[in-house]
Amino acid sequence: MKKILLILTLFISLTNLSYSDNHYPITRDSVLMIARGKIAYQNNCASCHQVNLSGAENWKGVDEDGHRKAPPLNGTGHTWHHDDETLHKIIKYGLAGIISDYEGKMGGFKDNLNDKDIDSVLAYIKSFWPDDYYQHQINLSK
């Protein structure tokens, strides 16, 4: 019994390590992943980036607090210019967690979303992008 538990623990540990190191690029190929991502997006992202992923109105400007507004994620902004690892980290840790002296409002969601949830959000977001933007971003993420 102890051997089985040891093997099972080792297997789970290796599975988690391989996922964390080798899950890019994130594609929009899975309908289930996109559906999961839509739910996670609506529950965590839509309040700033809007339900239709259009971003805040006049998103290139700053809000009343002097912070950059939430950009669109539907392909009309700059999200597709970043590789998956960067996008994943932005969602997980927030910009404050990866950029020193950042004073914006994009906080991290590591307490609300696990890595697979974040990947699903990214698959959902990518489902809105034109094919050429999607292909460009996939190439960045390989």
Image (spheres, rainbow, N blue to C red):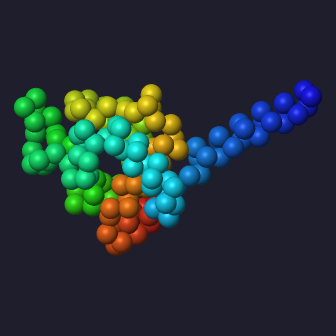
The extreme left residue here reads 64
Question: In the figure, is residue 24 to the left or right of 1?
Answer: left
| Pick the front one: 26 or 38 | 38
**Horizontal side, residue 93 vs residue 117: left or right:** left
Tell me what residue is drawn at x 84 percent, y 30 percent: 5
Q: Is residue 135 left or right of residue 59?
A: right
Viewer-closest of 106 and 126 = 126
Q: Residue at x 71, y 36 (%)?
A: 13
Furthest residue in direction bottom, as rendered: 132
- Residue positioned 48% across, 43% down in the render: 117
User: Can residue 10 be seen by looking at this rendering?
Assistant: yes
Count of marks, rendered view = 0
Residue 79, by quadrant, is: bottom left
Where in the figure is residue 22, as x and y percent of width and height?
A: 59, 51
Q: Position of residue 54 (x, y in %)?
A: 21, 53
Q: Residue at left 21%, top 43%?
A: 70
- Viewer-side residue, 57 vs 61: 57
Residue 27 horizontal side relative to residue 69, left or right: right
Relative image position of residue 14 (x, y in whole percent)? 72, 41
How far across and how far down the image is residue 25, in percent? Answer: 50, 58
The quarter of the picture where residue 99 lies is top left
Q: Is residue 81 visible?
A: no
Above or below, 17 relative to 129: above
- The one nearer the camera, 18 or 57, is 57
Examine the rendered structure and indicate whether residue 27 appears above or below residue 6: below
Q: Looking at the figure, which quarter contains the N terminus?
A: top right
